[in-house]
Image (spheres, grey):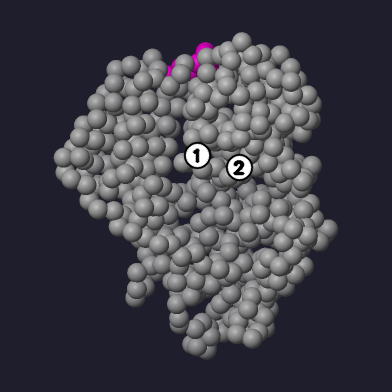
Amino acid sequence: MTGLYSFISHQRRIKAPRQICILTVVGAVLMVAFMLLIFPSSYHPIQQQRLIRSSDSDNLLQRMISKIEKLNMTEKLLQDIGKSSEFVSNNIESIKYSISTNDKQQKDSMALLNEILHKQANKKKIKNTENSKNSQKEGLGNIEMLPEFTGHIRITRNMNCMDGYNPDRLIVYPCNRTQPKQYWVYTKDQQLQTSEGWCIDGTGVSNSGILRVNPCDSSAKRQKFTFIQLQYHWNITGLLQIAGTNQCLTAPSPFEEDIASVRLSPCKELLCRQIVYLPIFFGYQKYGLHTFESTNGKGGRIFCWVMTSPANLYTKAIAVSDTWGRHCDKLVFVSTQTHPKLKVWLVNLAEPESRSSLWKKSKFAWMKAYHEYLNEFDWFIRCDDDSYLMMDNLRDFLSSKNPNDPYYIGRYFLGIHGNDKIPFYGGGAGTILSRQALNILGESATKNKSLLVDKNSFADDMELGLVMRAIGFPAKEWMDDEGRNLFIALGLDVERGMRKDVDPNNWFWLYSPSAKERMGCCSTRWIGTHYLKPQDMKTMEDLHFLGCEGAGVDGWK
């Protein structure tokens, strides 16, 4: 939520490596790529139900990628890598535009390259697997062995991964690329093994008991897992079942006292807490659309504009476009650079684009929508590139409202402005103006040039709150029928975990005085949330489809 606090990143520039080092790494990567091409037997279709460990060439490729991660990658290096892979070659721009001399962005760039390489490999694994596609469409089904994978296992809550750090208990923890004990390999013995040779173990664990992580033992029956396959969209989705039993790995509820330990419970009894996502890209089948045309006009015509930046155009913005943004009747992104596949409104800034430019970008977008699209759409929504909207829920919500009335809608907060408390809507979970509200804003700003003050500010949501209050539309609460928030500005896990008895002086209670705790915090038909990474958006779409998020039921009890 941009109006509450800013994150200050300390950047340091990486020194350019010597040319010989670059050439050495490029040569090694090309050599490994050649090895992968001449040994295609490393890839097996899912329908064969068999599995091998990661090949030596795969491991070598990973080591080379790790070395590249430490270098300041150049466009030429990317092109050289692209020559070894048609898929990478087709995505050179996606990688190139996300590369920076900033440490964090460079690591993110290499993670993107790594992901693309894995996607290419996984597409080969599942090529021509029509039987597998048909079986997953039909719903549940057991397979004796998981498809080959190495990587994170996301379990139920979209931000969290299974973590083997503590041998005394298997836990869920925020996914971290640098944590080796969050990377799992499914072995030929049907074991889930960390990179250090420890396996998930249910030996001696009864119903509701906590799973452990013990040294791998191929003879241990309760270290073996089968997979109950569910319908999925983005990644392979299903339940992990101890072989020969009816017990499945079950994540904790965010409302329990123990919000970390992974336990055993009967399969499908707590379905939404048992779903896992494997790091295998399927080449997804899109769910049905929720646009004006496809819903027979429910909720009116919706215009979505998304705040983004050049660093995120090829990652976060693409994820928005692929997931919830598809359901907008028009989707545009606001930045200072274009993208070949996205509609981008170019904003002209006098200074380099940064978080302090958000208010200038926001003013530009609202007024451009007013001048060019006012009469074509009913509702206008501002989001961030890490926002996620449940567009079917939004259309249900808007269907009872008239866009010719002045509506200003979002997640209510009280911000501090001087000695005054300013009601505003946190922008990350979505801010909505009806056509009439945008019309009044545009007319007022046209008549009063000083209304949209010209200044640098990262708090564009609070600035808009000041403007809307000035023209007679102060922010107010928007709740469901049970008094729960429809817009989850700090993210679902965070707000579900907020407790006054644990942290009564947290700024959250000052800024959001009417917020409720635990199960009372968030609507089961929530509309918008915030702080999702690209993979989280894909996971969220699957969770919604499976009835576990924003689907009208509480899947976390």
Q: Main secondary structure of the magenta part?
A: loop
Horizontal side, residue 379 vs residue 31: left or right: right
Q: Is residue 312 visible?
A: yes
Closest to the observer, 72 or 122: 72
Q: Which residue was labeled with disc 1?
A: 179
Camera sees residue 128: no
What residue is pinned by disc 2?
173
Instruction: Look at the picture and state if 163 lies above or below 339.
Output: above
Q: What residue lies at 55% left-to-right and 25% top-to-bottom?
A: 198
> Within the magenta stretch, is there residue 457?
no
Q: Quarter-wise, where is residue 222 in the image?
A: top right
The tag earlier along the polypeptide, 2 or 1, is 2
Total labels: the figure holds 2
Q: CA distance from mark 2 to mark 1?
A: 10 Å
In x, y percent, where is residue 481?
82, 59
Residue at the (35%, 56%) spot, across then down: 102
Residue 93, given in percent of the width and then of the height, sits at: 32, 47
**Residue 358 in picture, x, y percent from top left:** 47, 70
Mark 2: secondary structure: strand
Q: Which image quadrant: the C terminus?
A: top right
Picture disc at residue 553 = none
Q: Tell whether 184 sits left or right of 156.
A: left
Q: Secondary structure at mark 1?
A: loop
Which stretch did the figure color magenta? 43-51
Q: Which amino acid type is shown beneath numbered disc 2? A: Tyr
Crowd tier of the residue under label 1, counting other residues whose Cα lies within 10 Å: few below 14, some 14–19, many 20 or above = few
